[in-house]
Image (cartoon, rainbow, N blue to C red):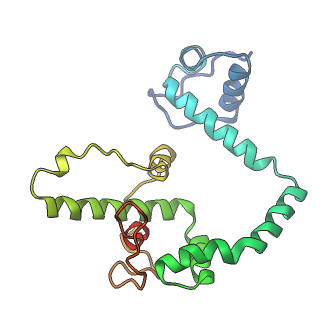
Amino acid sequence: MPSAPKSSGFRGSPTWSSHDDEVLMQARVKGMGWPQIAKQYFPAKSYNACRKRHERLMGRKDFEDWDQDRLESLGRRYMDLRKEMWSVLGDAVGERYDVVEAKCMEMGLQNLKTASRHSRKRDQQSLAVQRGPGTAERDSAIGMDETEDDLDRSGGTDQSFPYEVPGFPVQGRRASDRSNGCGMPLQSMLS
């Protein structure tokens, strides 16, 4: 097992080298726990930082392991299901499926997560104003969905994205006010 790498500075340093990644993966293969790995090999990082890095590496490994046959199969199934998949979202926002597909592909997942987060915050602020003063401080944040949690873990920032998404006006949407079963209109969830 390689020795502990030199400390890269302050605790929680965001920099991981390829050597660090190797050490981390080898330590996990040996069955070491996160606190032990952090203490022995990464004294400048928290055990949680080591755990999250390992998760990202494993996710990347799964992504990079796709061979040509698997990619071709995905491409074929995507083309078979594309209209059906995107039509659901297109109907919800009042746009053609192919327009919504192109806009989502153009924006990318992280930007869509950020836009969703801004919309949810705006909805929460509006609801707090309707309820009266002091209600925002009492919000428990219960209901934070996995997408928002993923954004927090991935290091996405709210400042990097405008409140309004080009092509999807905040006001005057054409989507109907259909409910998602939770009493909240789909339109507001997708804005």
Q: Position of residue 62 (x, y in %)?
A: 74, 44
Q: Farthest right residue? A: 69
Residue at left offset 74%, top offset 15%:
1
Q: Residue furthest left?
A: 133
Question: Of 116 and 44, which appears nearest the observer?
Answer: 116
Q: Residue at x 40, y 69 (%)?
A: 179
The quarter of the displayed image where residue 176 is located? bottom left
* Percent position of residue 166, x then y: 45, 79
Q: Does any portion of residue 45 appear in the rendered image?
A: no
Return the x and y of residue 50 as percentages of the image width and height: 56, 28
Q: Is residue 121 above or below residue 46?
A: below
Q: Quadrant of residue 87?
A: bottom right
- Residue 110, given in percent of the width and then of the height, sits at 52, 59
Note whether 102 is above or below 163 in the view shown. below
* Residue 107 in which image quadrant: bottom right
Residue 82 lies, with reference to residue 95, above or below; the image says: above
Count of marks overlaid on the render = 0
Question: Could one spot residue 173 in this view of the protein?
Answer: yes
* Lateral position of residue 13 relative to residue 117, left or right: right
127 or 61, nearer to the observer: 127
Residue visible at 31% across and 59% down in the picture: 121
The one of 132 and 183 positioned closer to us in this rendering: 183
Q: Which image quarter is the C terminus in?
A: bottom left
On the picture, is 174 further left or further right than 36?
A: left
